Image: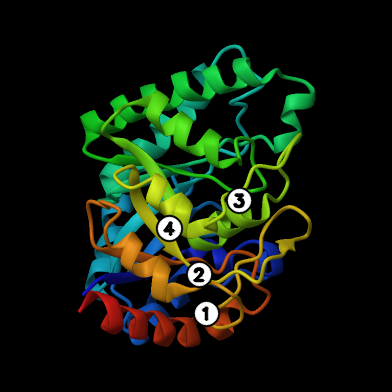
Amino acid sequence: MKKISIGTWAYTIGPYADNPVPWDEVVTKLAALRFDGLELGGFGIHPHPDNLPTKEGRRECAQKVKDAGLAFSGLAANLWGEHLLDAEDNAAYLAEFRKNLAFCVDMGIPGIRVDAVQPPTIFDTVDYATARDRAVRTWRQCAKDAADAGVYVTWEFEPGFAFNKPSDIIGIVEEVDHPNFGIMFDTCHAHMVAAVGARQPGEKETLPGGALELAQKLRGKINHLHLIDSDGTLHGDETSTHAPFGDGILDYDTLIPELLQSGVPHDWWTIDLCFWPDAWAVTAQCKRAIDELNRKFAS
């Protein structure tokens, strides 16, 4: 059976930005719903390197999570204030990454998420080759640093960020070419990228087999999974709509068997309800749905 977690950012951003769910309440409810863990959105009022600056504070926080019967499946680091593709010097980005990497080590968090930071419109001001070289060079260094710390790096592609075509995703992970760097395969992002071609600059690039075909092409390069449905739309014309299971069109009877062969080196399945308007209310529903998938495919 897979271990089930959920991203805590769903309770702090978007519809929850003005009234985030307190950390202790999140931990208590997820434990009551019999989650195995949580994936930390390291920003806002939830724990992050700046509001937990000391090792002692971090150990205390991690112990409370453990005492609740939970574990961390990963960290969504707050790197969105940095410039990755439109900066000649990556020193500031790397410094922020390393700060979050140290936080992972202190908290016992096994993996750290990155993305391209800038939207696909960045190519209006930075040429593609330059931007790609900056991402590859920086992420290769991140992968090396994280490997030394015993933490893996996972890149979440999506329509809202640059490099959102299947060939970009496949090509960049191959170009980074580091065993500690891989792809976060989010099922709703995969559908919007591979089947819809949402927000792709220039000529659209899709795959006949959609998300399933993309997963097949990425077999052996995926090191983290986010499972959630897609209704084929964008949230605010920006990023994929993260629809609760059953509210979308994804075919999990074909996707899950492929993802079980993807080579992910751990047993976490993470629910992502990012920007869903009543994420707190539908968390239990999503837990029941993913538990059923777990019983059906991973038992």
Could you tell me if the residues under marks 2 and 4 are in contact, i.e. CB atoms within 8 Å? no
Q: Quick check: 265 left or right of 184?
A: left
Could you tell me if the residues under marks 1 and 2 are in contact, i.e. CB atoms within 8 Å? yes
Look at the image and tell me whether residue 55 can be seen.
no
- Disc number lying in front (2 or 4): 2
Question: What residue did someone put label 4 on?
Answer: 40
Q: Label 1 is placed on what type of residue?
A: Phe
Q: CA distance from mark 2 to mark 4?
A: 17 Å
Residue name at image x 34 percent, y 66 percent: 269
Q: Label 2 is placed on what type of residue?
A: Ile
Q: CA distance from mark 1 to mark 2?
A: 6 Å
Q: Residue furthest front?
A: 208
**N-terminal-most mark, 3 or 4:** 4
Residue name at image x 28 percent, y 73 percent: 36
Question: What residue did someone put label 2 on?
Answer: 228
Question: What residue did someone put label 3 on?
Answer: 193
Question: How many other residues sit within 10 Å of disc 2, few (<14), some (14-19) or many (≥20)?
Answer: many
Could you tell me if the residues under marks 1 and 3 are in contact, i.e. CB atoms within 8 Å? no
Question: Residue 11 at x, y = what percent?
Answer: 57, 69
In the image, 96 versus 52, the foreground residue is 96
Dot 3: element: helix
Quadrant into which the C terminus falls = bottom left
Q: CA distance from mark 3 to mark 4?
A: 25 Å
Could you tell me if the residues under marks 3 and 4 are in contact, i.e. CB atoms within 8 Å? no
**N-terminal-most mark, 3 or 2:** 3
Quadrant into which the N terminus falls = bottom left
Q: Label 3 is placed on what type of residue?
A: Val
For residue 245, which numbered disc appears in the image?
1
Q: CA distance from mark 3 to mark 2?
A: 15 Å
In the image, 151 versus 226, the foreground residue is 226
